[in-house]
Image (cartoon, rainbow, N blue to C red):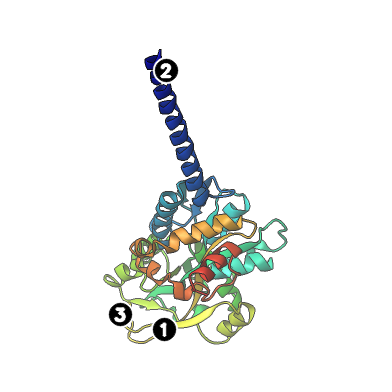
């Protein structure tokens, strides 16, 4: 009888130990889960980028991977024609994060250009400034095009439809008193523009990118390339209407050009809807900036994304979630 009682007591001790261990484990997991920050609204993150051959897509693909790994959420990178389509994807809530050039953001928030009369364009906010895109107006020696005004009656590539390149081209042309009615228009990607310049199918093309532009570099190895300067009264008109636009120069020797060429630039910006949850944007910003080495390796232009330049050239205010992170790490 005493032996039986001892056996029963041992069984109870074992069962109680298991219950205590289970409770401790559950308590520990609850603590771990409490400590681990989780996304509030975003159960899937789509990064709206650009054409698959450009920097937007290359950098966006790396961002998608980082966000998926760090936040343990489903992600995708969305190819697009660029800034205008990306803002539309944000409007439709088909993307959470988007690459957008400064002039397109400015037009969207002011309700001008392609956004004139629209009442459903969402308010946007920035995660960070990225790197400038320099507008190139490219032609070949012998085309007779030495100024923007010389585009009259020519065949001109203006970028893909609804791309940032086309948006840049339109505001520039307007400042110089030109419209699409003044020349033959072709909607072409970077590579297609270079090919058609090479083959004599167009006389000039707009491209917007970092310096140097790889398609123009390739073209310059086969043809004498001319970058048309952006200057004079037209430039003054442009800067008065778009104070967010920067001026600069393409250095001599970039495309075998013998002199510096004055051009304009727009800052690329990583943006979200202003109504995105603060915690979600905070976590996304943290994930990206804690993996800058990986981001920098995605494209040369991405190396300009740094803690020192998060507000440089921004058209938008930082989203509260992004600002919170940058303040925590002393970047602001």
Contact, mark 3 vs mark 2 (Cβ under 8 Å): no
| Residue at 51% from the left image edge and 43% from the top image edge | 30
Does any portion of residue 224 appear in the rendered image? yes
Residue 35 in picture, x, y percent from top left: 50, 51
Contact, mark 3 vs mark 1 (Cβ under 8 Å): no
Mark toward the start of the polypeptide (3 vs 1):
3
Up/down of 192 relative to 18, above or below: below
Q: What residue sits right under mark 2 in the picture? A: 5
- Which of the two residues, 53 or 233, is positioned nearer the viewer here? 53
| Residue at 54% from the left image edge and 45% from the top image edge | 43
Q: Is residue 280 left or right of residue 49?
A: right
Residue 256's label in the rendered image is 3
Circle 2: element type: helix
Residue 212 in picture, x, y percent from top left: 35, 73
Q: Is residue 17 left or right of residue 274?
A: left
Q: Nearer the viewer, mark 2 or mark 1?
A: 2
């Amino acid at each position: 009888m005493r032996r039986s009682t001892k056996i029963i007591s041992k069984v109870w001790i074992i069962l109680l130990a298991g219950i205590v261990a289970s409770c401790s484990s559950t308590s520990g997991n609850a603590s771990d889960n409490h400590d681990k920050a989780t996304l509030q609204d975003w159960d899937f993150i789509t990064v709206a980028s650009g054409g698959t051959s450009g920097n937007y897509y290359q950098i966006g693909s790396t961002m998608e991977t980082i966000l998926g790994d760090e936040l343990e959420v489903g992600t995708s990178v969305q190819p697009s024609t660029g800034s205008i389509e990306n803002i539309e994807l944000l409007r439709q809530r088909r993307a959470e994060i988007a690459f957008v050039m400064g002039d397109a953001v400015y037009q969207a928030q002011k309700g001008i250009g392609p956004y004139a009369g629209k009442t459903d364009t969402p308010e946007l906010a920035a995660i960070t400034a990225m790197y400038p895109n320099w507008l190139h107006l490219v032609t070949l020696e012998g085309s007779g095009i030495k100024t923007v005004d010389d585009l009259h009656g020519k065949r001109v590539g203006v970028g893909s439809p609804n791309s940032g390149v086309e948006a840049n081209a339109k505001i520039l042309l307007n400042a110089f008193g030109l419209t699409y009615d003044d020349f033959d228009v072709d909607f072409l990607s970077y590579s297609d523009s270079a090919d058609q310049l090479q083959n004599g199918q167009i006389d000039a093309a707009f491209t917007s990118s970092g310096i140097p532009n790889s398609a123009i570099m390739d073209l310059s190895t086969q043809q004498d390339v001319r970058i048309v300067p952006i200057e004079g009264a037209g430039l003054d008109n442009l800067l008065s209407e778009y104070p967010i636009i920067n001026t600069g120069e393409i250095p001599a020797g970039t495309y075998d050009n013998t002199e510096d060429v004055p051009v304009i630039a727009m800052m690329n910006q990583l943006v979200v809807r202003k109504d995105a949850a603060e915690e979600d944007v905070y976590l996304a910003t943290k994930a990206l900036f804690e993996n800058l080495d990986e981001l920098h390796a995605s494209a040369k232009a991405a190396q300009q994304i740094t803690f020192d330049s998060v507000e440089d050239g921004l058209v938008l205010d930082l989203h509260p979630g992004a600002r919170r992170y940058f303040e925590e790490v002393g970047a602001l």
